[in-house]
Image: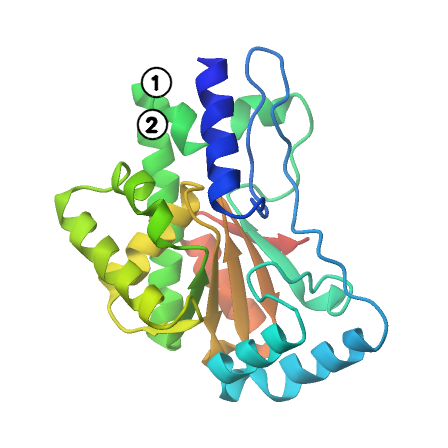
Amino acid sequence: MLLDQIQDILKFIALNNGFIGFGALYGVAGMVVCVKFYSTGQIEGDSLKDIKSIIELEFWNNPIGVTKKLEAMEEDLLWIDLDDIFPENMFLIDQFPAPLRYPASEELEIIYDYSKDDINEYKYYLKVERQYIEIIKRFWGISPVYILSNMNTELLELLRVHTDEKESFILKSIIDQTKEHNGSLLLYEKFTEIQLLTKLSLREKLESCFVFPNMKMILWINGLICKVYLGDDQYKELVKLISTTHGLYLRKV
């Protein structure tokens, strides 16, 4: 069992060019496979000022164009670390109101792959997953959403295992769009596609970045936690209200 889990992790990392971004992979049988962490791409020097200016002044009016501009600067929106640039604007949307202490974290945190071994735990996972999907739906009702993920053709067969027949057709459409636009940031208008990308990201099958320009908000999702950049203080209370209404918490990183 442990060997199979480790092999799945290594295969996923290999298919994503060595990256797994932030999320949670859990210890098994007393052995720590991996711990929670965040993307460690650090930005130094004048690039800090450049990126700060680009995000604040340009990004929200032209998310796709500015994402390509960042790529020309060798910065990837999917992995970029904005914590040092915008420490006051970085938050988490979490199912817990504060960081969990050890060893309580091992009992309380939940991950999709391991939850399937226990029917009650699996039902609980699906309940929390639905809470996240509902807040994404509310955000989408306020702002269009652009999504960037590490979706690629090589991941298709792995991802199909985690979808039903209807979702497989949606998944194929998403992959075709991604391929057509060379894996760049895309505007998604259909909630069925947004929901599937959200679900696969919450289940740690994808790394995804959701951009809501009208709210000046970016969400990075990989596991049952979202890292959030909020560029406009007027939306902080609204995001907090939407989160708590659906049983989740907005808290500082």
Percent coordinates x, y for residue 27 in the rendering: 58, 21
Mark count: 2
Which x, y percent locates residue 171?
25, 54
Which numbered tag is attached to residue 238?
none
| Residue in the foreground of this view, choosing between 215 and 169 | 169
Q: Secondary structure at mark 1?
A: loop
* Horizontal arrangement in the rendering, residue 221 relative to residue 97 (left or right): left
Give the distance between the C-alpha atoms of the residues marked 2 and 1, in whole angstroms: 6 Å
Q: Does any portion of residue 91 appear in the rendered image?
A: yes
Which percent across, then down, holds residue 198?
A: 37, 53
Amino acid on which disc 1 is placed: Asp
Which residue is depicted at the point 49% across and 15% down?
Answer: 3
At x 79%, y 79%, the residue is 49
Query: Up-down: is 6 above or below 246?
Result: above
- The structure residue drawn at horizontal position 13% and vertical position 49%, both measured from the top left corner, is 166
Residue holding disc 2: 122
**Residue 74, percent across and down?**
66, 70
Q: Quadrant of residue 119?
A: top left
> Which label belongs to residue 118?
1
Identify which amino acid the numbered label 2 is placed on. Answer: Tyr
Mark 2 vs 1: CB contact within 8 A: yes
Question: Is residue 114 toward the left or the right of residue 32 in the image?
Answer: left
Looking at the image, the residue that sits furthest to the right is 45
Q: Residues within 10 Å of mark 2 (few under 14, many from 20)?
A: some
Q: Tell me the element at label 2.
A: helix
Where's the N terminus, which quadrant? top left
Q: Nearer the viewer, residue 36 or 236?
A: 36
